Amino acid sequence: MAAPATDNAANTGLQPRVFLFLEGPSSPLFCKIAADLETRGHRCLRINLNAGDQIFWRRRGGHNYRGRGGLEWQNYVATFMDGHGVTDLVLLGEERPYHQLALAAAKARRIEVSVIEMGYLRPDWLTLERNGMSSNSNFPADPQQIIDAAQDLPEPDWTRRHTQSFVADAGYDLLYNLPNVFLWFLFPHYRRHALFHPLAEYAGWLRRLAGSGRNARKASALITRLIDRKTRFFVYPLQLQTDYQLRSHSPYNGQHQAIEHILRSFACHADADTHLVVKVHPLDNGLIDWEGHIARLSTELQIGDRVDFLDGGDLNALSAKALGLVTVNSTAGLHALQIGTPVKVLGAAVFDIAGLSDQSALENFWAAPAPPQEPTRTAFFRLLAATIQVRGNFYSKKGTDAGALAIAERLHNRSVNQPGAFVDPPPRRRPEKIAPARMSER
């Protein structure tokens, strides 16, 4: 949905700018944002790094980069920015290798960077932040600053406005990734940031889908049993192994390491009558046997009868009855905080804030989990929704139309992270990685 043609840079007194788009979601969202920005008088360009990028741009301003990564790409993107007078950089996933080099070039030129991701407040929100997420986020971390900034903001409308189907999600993903596999020779030097080959991922998802009905029934029965028996339990939702929030903004080198740390801590410090419910991510590709790994480690730690594994089921219903939720930095923690469940964060996360998440050590969390406090909780969600979230999604027409229009408006007005949600330098530190040999000591 385009903005009215009269709402442009010239007649609002804003200078026309040049927006450069890099890799985005397997979705028409970036293309729609560009169309909305151009109705406001700006110029939009795109560097396509692969065939999927090219398919999802389908408009003017596209430039195909077929060179190598590393220094060759860094020199190319820097020259491109200079030659085209780029003022703004828009991308998804600021930790991707190509994006890291582009970000360095942009910062050297004082080009404003905006990062788009799936919403913190899922399911029908999108994230739009200056510079990045987690350790890169400029969102305030001081609770009093958040309370002050949110004092005049209304409670967000939590009514769900947009829906998207798994079929649309899968279809867009296939449309993006299959050309990259079979038409690789068009961009012969492109290197994926993902850990798994797309065909291997699709095979894994098909296997998971085949058993999804059985797994969902099993998970629902377990949740019902835990609640009916008034079992005292904590929840640990797994993230995707490919998630850059886990890979770049946590102390762990991968999910195996995170699982070991949490299970060892639970075995040593949690009350003997408590359970730990580990839930696999709904989009996990099934290529790693998390259930088997957790079962073996639980047996080794002599807590096999206290650790439950879920593949499916209602996480919100589970979190509402839990003693607490422990996470590396999954957005599942946000939903738990919304309903007042104590949350312990082990990586860098925008919601790891005193008075909101539990700030004690993990070994203390098992014994005395601290719930979110008012007015910090209410102020946080109001400020988050008003400044770095917009309504929309990646995979439906109405969701992408609404999301594109809202994002374009904020980019046009330079209102990203406004009002009052930008702190420079970023207030969160990137966690130091834990050496595998030290894991058993923690």
Image (spheres, helix red, strand yellow):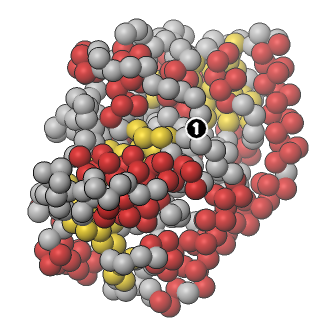
Residue placed under numbered mark 1 in the picture: 161
Query: In screen coordinates, is 373 left or right of 137?
Result: right
Q: Is residue 365 above or below residue 256?
A: above
Instruction: Give the quadrant of residue 352.
Output: top left
**Circle count:** 1
Identify the residue shown where x is 44% and y is 86%: 187
Which one is nearer the viewer's eye here, 194 or 4? Answer: 4
Residue 268 visible within the image: no
Helix, strand or loop at label 1? It is loop
| Residue 226 at x, y percent in the picture | 78, 19
In this rendering, the answer to whether 343 lies above or below 27 is above
- Whole-percent x, y for residue 210 in the image: 85, 56
Q: Is residue 218 left or right of residue 239?
A: right
Q: Give percent across and percent down for residue 278.
A: 67, 33
Closer to the camera in the image, 324 or 108:
108
For the C terminus, give its image quadrant: top left
In the depicted view, which residue is nearer to us: 6 or 249? 6
